[in-house]
Image (tube, rainbow, N blue to C red):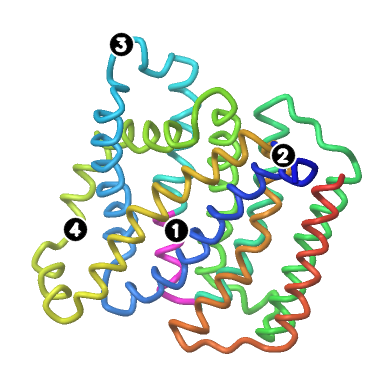
């Protein structure tokens, strides 16, 4: 039992739980855009509700005492986390989901593990092996090939939604990596809570300016399920999921554990089939097992 339940494997398990939660992001966001939530309402609303919850959590844990406040060095790193996961990722995924299917978006976001590994090398002292980089690149190419094969897309068909997701890949990877690095020094829940709290001075006024309360009431009257999904998106995908993911990155290593995120497009595709009625093919199942093998090899490297 102890042979398999190592500290590194525990990190992978926590990261995997986080990825399952994150895989619901695009299907839920896609649904919300279909009931006329704007991308800015979703993006800033996520940061607002998750930020308020983070304030309560930090208060309950006594983290606002002087000795528990982040240092100036940590504060600078938390700003990088906030840029990636509080602002860029929620806003640009919402923009993308207005124009492209959730399953397609999940495939694009499969490049996030490679982006995270690259930023892990740039922002920390992690130095993955050449073999690791090779496997990571293969993983990236594999999911891109999958996307092209299943959606009959060519370079000329790439639209604004794809570019929005590309921003998520780059800036989101930066936020994931920096959060994972901080996760080595402080608990994962502290990383995301503080990132959300320091964002509130900007998030609150932007939410007030962009959120239509009358529209929110109308959506609640028409479909209370949409309100519950929005709350889930805010509290789980913007907060609780990071408790697991950042803790896993900090325990098992940012570059290695981040490769578990390669599972995300397939979970996203699965949830898109179940909740949105999108189609999953045998080819997708084949690539699922292929990606599992790549993740395993990256772990070994």
- Residue 182's quadrant in the figure? top right
Residue that sits furthest to the right in the current view: 131
**At which x and y percent is residue 267?**
58, 70
Q: What's drawn in magenta, residue-wise?
A: 90-100
**Mark closest to the chain's N terminus, 3 or 1:** 3
Q: Which residue is mark 2?
A: 8
Q: State the separation of the CA atoms marked 4 and 2.
A: 42 Å
Q: Which residue is mark 1?
A: 92
Q: Between tags 3 and 4, which lies in front?
A: 3
Q: Between tags 2 and 3, which lies in front?
A: 2
- As drawn, is 66 to the left or to the right of 135? left
Are there few (<14), some (14-19), or many (20+) residues within 10 Å of tag 1? many
Q: Which mark is residue 211?
A: 4
| Element marked by disc 4 | loop
Q: State the separation of the CA atoms marked 3 and 4.
A: 34 Å
Residue 9's place in the image compared with 266, above or below, is above
| Element marked by disc 2 | helix
**Mark closest to the chain's N terminus, 4 or 2:** 2
Image quarter hosting the C terminus:
top right
Name which residue lies at 32% across and 22% down: 63
Q: State the separation of the CA atoms marked 2 and 3.
A: 33 Å
Residue 14's place in the image compared with 121, above or below, is below
**Mark closest to the chain's N terminus, 2 or 3:** 2
**At which x and y percent is residue 146?**
73, 76
């Amino acid at each position: 039992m102890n042979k398999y339940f190592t500290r590194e494997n525990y990190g992978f398990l926590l990261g995997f739980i986080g990825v399952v939660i994150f895989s619901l992001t695009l299907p839920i966001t896609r649904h919300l855009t279909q009931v006329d939530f704007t991308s800015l309402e979703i993006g800033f609303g996520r940061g607002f509700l998750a930020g308020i919850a983070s304030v309560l959590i930090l208060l309950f844990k006594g983290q606002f005492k002087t000795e528990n406040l982040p240092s100036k060095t940590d504060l600078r790193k938390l700003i990088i986390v906030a840029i990636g996961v509080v602002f860029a990722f929620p806003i640009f995924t919402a923009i993308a989901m207005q124009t492209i299917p959730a399953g397609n978006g999940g495939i694009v976001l499969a490049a996030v593990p490679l982006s995270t590994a690259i930023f892990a090398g740039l922002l920390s002292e992690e130095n993955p092996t050449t073999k690791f980089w090779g496997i990571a690149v293969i993983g990236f190419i594999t999911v891109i090939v999958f996307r092209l094969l299943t959606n009959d897309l060519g370079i000329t068909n790439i639209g604004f939604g794809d570019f929005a997701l590309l921003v998520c890949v780059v800036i989101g990877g930066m936020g994931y990596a920096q959060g994972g690095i901080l996760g080595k020094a402080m608990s994962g829940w502290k990383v995301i809570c503080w990132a959300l709290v320091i964002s509130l001075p900007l998030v609150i006024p932007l939410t007030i300016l962009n959120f239509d309360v009358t529209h929110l009431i109308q959506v609640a009257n028409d479909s209370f399920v949409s309100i519950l999904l929005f709350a889930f998106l805010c509290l789980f995908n913007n907060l609780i999921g990071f408790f697991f993911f950042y803790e896993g990155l900090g325990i098992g290593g940012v570059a290695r554990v981040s490769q578990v995120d390669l599972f995300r497009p397939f979970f996203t595709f699965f949830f898109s089939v179940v909740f949105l009625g999108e189609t999953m093919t045998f080819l997708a199942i084949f690539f699922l097992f292929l990606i599992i093998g790549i993740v395993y090899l990256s772990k070994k490297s």
